Image (cartoon, rainbow, N blue to C red):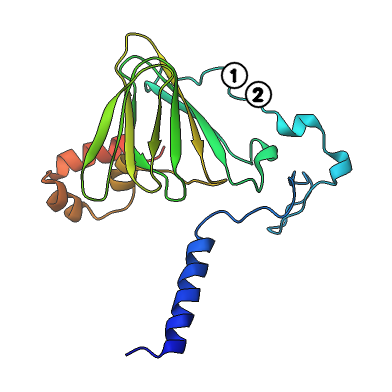
Amino acid sequence: MIPSQMKVFLVIFLQSYIVLAYDPDPVHDYCIPREEFTSIFLSCKNSSLVTVDDFVYSGIKDPGNYKHSGFSSIPVSSTAFPGLNTLGMSFVRADFDIDGVNVPHFHPRATETAFVLEGRIYSGFVDSGSRVFAKVLEKGEVMVFPKGLVHFQMNVGESPATILGSFNSQNPGLVKIPSAVFGTGIKEELLMKAFGLNDKEIAKLRKKFVPQ
């Protein structure tokens, strides 16, 4: 039996752990980072020096270059848009050529909402019970992808498509399944056994997904 005091300690510890698993609440209205400050410790620009331009970002007005791979994403974090700093959010613009695919991936630190700005997107996610939730989204529709769950998107329309994604974390993280599996140093023998592939097939996939 666990003593009552130990139970209280465990409850407090777990509650603290859960809280720390999310972006901390800001202690200021905003915190525009000082450009000249390079320490790991946060330093905010004096509020008297902050202007409206610190809260405006123009970097996703135009689509990314999706012609080579069929897909392009422009992530917008506090690094690119300092006005987001400490606010616990970030976003992304994703552009798809016809038949373009955003490969299965997940964000370990954030839930995502995806808004279809243009086009028709087959979109979905897989839960921890291996159940797939997917459908074709039309222009103006929104889908939510719970934190840490694998999700995917494909343009099934007859013209290019665009999605705007929003995250409830300043640093959502991104793990692309094909690159994480075949583009890293996982032992070839394991991959062959796990996926039923031979060495030539593994080599072909590694050539495709290893970062250049």
How packed mark 2 is, by other alpha carbons closer than 10 Å (few <14, some 14-19, many 20 or more), is: few
Give the mark count.
2
Q: Which residue is farthest top?
A: 158
Q: Which residue is farthest front?
A: 4
Q: Which residue is farthest right?
A: 48
Residue with the mark numbered 2 = 58
Q: Nearer the viewer, residue 119 or 193?
A: 119
Residue 101: which quarter of the image? top left
Residue 133 image position (x, y, % from top left): 26, 36
Q: Nearer the viewer, residue 42 or 137?
A: 137
Lateral position of residue 144 relative to residue 129, left or right = right
Q: Nearer the viewer, residue 92 or 194?
A: 92
Q: Secondary structure at mark 1?
A: loop
Q: Amino acid at mark 1?
A: Lys
Lateral position of residue 133 relative to residue 47, left or right = left
Q: Is residue 205 visible?
A: yes
Q: CA distance from mark 2 to mark 1?
A: 6 Å
Residue 210: which quarter of the image? top left
Q: Is residue 67 placed above or below 82 in the rendered structure? A: above
Residue 207 image position (x, y, % from top left): 29, 37
Residue 206 image position (x, y, % from top left): 28, 41
How packed mark 1 is, by other alpha carbons closer than 10 Å (few <14, some 14-19, many 20 or more), is: few
Image quadrant where one finds the N terminus: bottom left
Q: Residue at x 59, y 19 (%)?
A: 61
Kindly check if marks 2 and 1 are in contact, taking CB atoms under 8 A apart as contact: yes
Q: Secondary structure at mark 2?
A: loop
Q: Is residue 74 visible?
A: no
Q: Residue at x 79, y 30 (%)?
A: 52
Q: Amino acid at mark 2?
A: Ser
Residue with the mark numbered 1 = 61
